Image: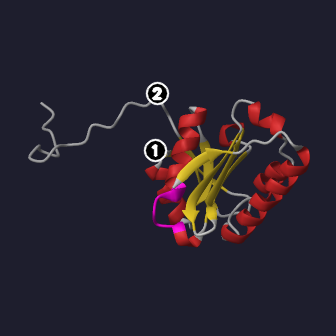
Amino acid sequence: MQISSIYDSQPDRWQARIAGLLDFLREYGEQRLTLRGCRQLARLSPEQLAVPGVSLLVATVRGQYGRQLAGVSFVSGYGKEACLVAVHPLYRGRHTGTALLSAQLQRLGRLECQVACDNPASLKMCFNSGLAAVDLTNGPTGKPTLLLRFRPDRSTAILPQEGEPLCQNPS
């Protein structure tokens, strides 16, 4: 699998490419992607990809007829405006979404997204990418939704090692 950034300076080719990515998101987003995020992507121009906090990545695999799309990730405003990830069903459970989000984190340095609590696959992808839940809100559809954020300043948790007592006696 290869993760790469999408950019194109030819307006006629750009619109066709964005339309294809939106079709992919509609087909494989399981109707869980926000309309707001999809509209942000539909209005995206090549120049906007130079704006800090905006990134469009794709995961591709080598197939019988060349490279095939396995997943898409779009982030705007470091995730505050839009954070979309969709993976083709053939490549789910293979950490494709985690690889896309991790690449976004590496590229942007920080990231946040909102995931409905009834979406365990997306929550697992976010947690595996290093995001942590920082708030519980009601999402656009009224469902309980976690706000997930990567916190580079947060120190790594120190977990007990095998054989260490789990409870300390406060003396």
Range of residues picked out in magenta: 91-97
- Camera-side mark, 2 or 1: 1
Q: Quadrant of the C terminus?
A: top left
Callout 2 amino acid: Asp
Q: Secondary structure at mark 2?
A: loop
Instruction: Estimate the x, y position of residue 169 in percent, counting from the top left.
Output: 12, 38
Callout 1 amino acid: Gly
Query: In the image, what residue occupies the spot 51% across and 58% down?
Result: 96
Res. 153 mark: 2
Q: In front: 57, or 160? A: 57
Query: In the image, what residue occupies the spot 60% across and 42% down?
Result: 112
Whether residue 135 is visible to the viewer of this picture, yes or no, is: no
Residue labelled with disc 1 = 130
Looking at the image, residue 151 sits to the left or right of residue 137; the answer is left
Instruction: Estimate the x, y position of residue 45 in percent, counting from the top left.
Output: 85, 41
Instruction: Estimate the x, y position of residue 54 in percent, counting from the top left.
Output: 71, 38
Count of all numbered marks drawn on residues in the image = 2
Looking at the image, residue 117 sits to the left or right of residue 139; the answer is left
Query: In the image, what residue occupies the spot 50% across and 45% down?
Result: 131
